[in-house]
Amino acid sequence: MSALRSAIQRRFEAWLDKRNPRRNEWVLSQNKIFIFPSSAGLGFLLMLSGLLLLAINYQNNLIFALVFLLFSLFLVVILHTYTNLSGLQIRAGACEPVFAGDTAHFHVHINSQQRPRFQLQVGFPQQRKQVSELAKGEGVEVRVPCPAPRRGRLYPGRIQVRSDYPLGVIRCWAMPALDWHCLVYPRPRALRPLMSSARGDGHGEVFDMRSDSDEFSGFERYQPGESPRRIFWKAYAKGQGLFSKRYEESRADDLSLDWESLPELAVEDRLSTLCAWALECDRRELPFSLHLPTADISAGQGPAHLAAVLRELAIYPAEAGR
C-alpha cells in the first residue's frame, strides 16, 4: 500500500511540475486551484443521500425540500471557497541562513487586490500551517517553517495555500512552486583545537581560544561602524564622549582555517570543526582565512567575511571526499 501511495505521489508531483513550473511569483487562477470535499463535506453528502432515500421511500415533500435546500447551500459554499483563493498573489521572499539541525523560515508575501481573504492556511505539506487573513488591497508576510536537517542549499519544494472557508465542507488549495532556497551551514562542533599557521609546515601551534589573544593598548575616538563591544561605555556615561578601546595582537601568525589541518576527520566533521573555528574567531574579532580544496578566502574579519566563509563551508560538495 505504501509503495502504491508513493508511486501515485510521484506521478502527481511530475504532473504538477509540468503544469505549474517553478517561478518567483504566482497569481492563483482557475487552472492552479484544486477543490474537493473535505471529510466533513463527504459526511455531509452522505447524510443528504440518506435523507434523499428517506424522502423517496416515504414520498415526504418536506424532506425533499430540506435535501434540496442543503444541497443548494453546498453548491454556494463551493463558489465562496474557490473565491477565497482565486486571484491571490503569492511571491517568494527571503530566507535567512541557518545551521544544520535548525528550522529555516521562508518568507512568503501574500497580497489581495480584489477582495478580503479569510482563514488562509499557508505552509509546506506535512508541516504546521500558518493562518492569515487579509483585507481588500492588503498584503501580509508569512514566515513558513521548514526543517533543515543537512547542510547545503535547501530547496523546500512546493508550498501549500489552503482554505476551508466558510463552512469547512469544501477544501480548496493550490501548490505553487516558488523559486527560492535557503543556505544551511554545517553544525558547529570544534572536534580539534584551532591550529595557527597551519598552512606552513603542517606543524602549527595550538591556539588557545579560551584566553584573550590581544593586549590593551589605549583609547581612540570612536569611528562609526566599529563594534559596540569596543566602546568605552564608562567614559560615555560620564559625558566624556565616545571612545573605543584599542588592542594589539600578541600573536605573530595569522589564523588559518585549513582543510588539510584535519586529515583524520571525515568530510562533515571537518566542515563542522572549521565552522566552529570561524564563529569563535568572529566572536573574538580575530582576522582569519579559510583554505578548502574548492575555495580560498584571504584573511579578514567582520560580518561579510564570516558570511562568505560560512557560505563556502555550506556549499562544499559532499562528493569531494577527503
Image (cartoon, rainbow, N blue to C red):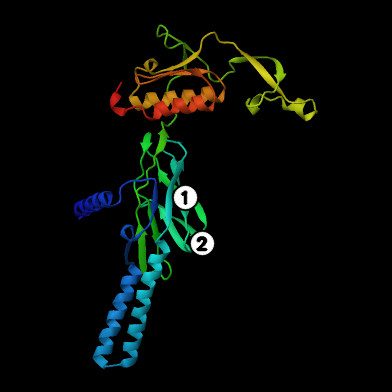
Q: Is residue 240 visible?
A: yes
The x and y percentages for residue 157 are: 34, 46
Q: Is residue 245 above or below residue 183?
A: above
Question: What kind of element bears circle 1?
Answer: strand
Instruction: Indicate left or right for 125 with 130 as reference.
Output: left
The x and y percentages for residue 124 are: 38, 50
**Which disc, if any, is residue 136?**
2
The x and y percentages for residue 142 are: 48, 51
Which numbered disc, 1 or 2, marks the residue closer to the eye?
Answer: 2
Q: Provide the residue designation for mark 1.
A: 109
Instruction: Indicate left or right for 88 with 22 as reference.
Output: right
Label count reads: 2
Q: Residue at x 49, y 26 (%)?
A: 306
Q: Residue furthest front?
A: 114
Quadrant in which the N terminus appears = bottom left
Q: Residue furthest top?
A: 201
Q: Is residue 25 above or below residue 248?
A: below
Q: Is residue 150 visible?
A: no
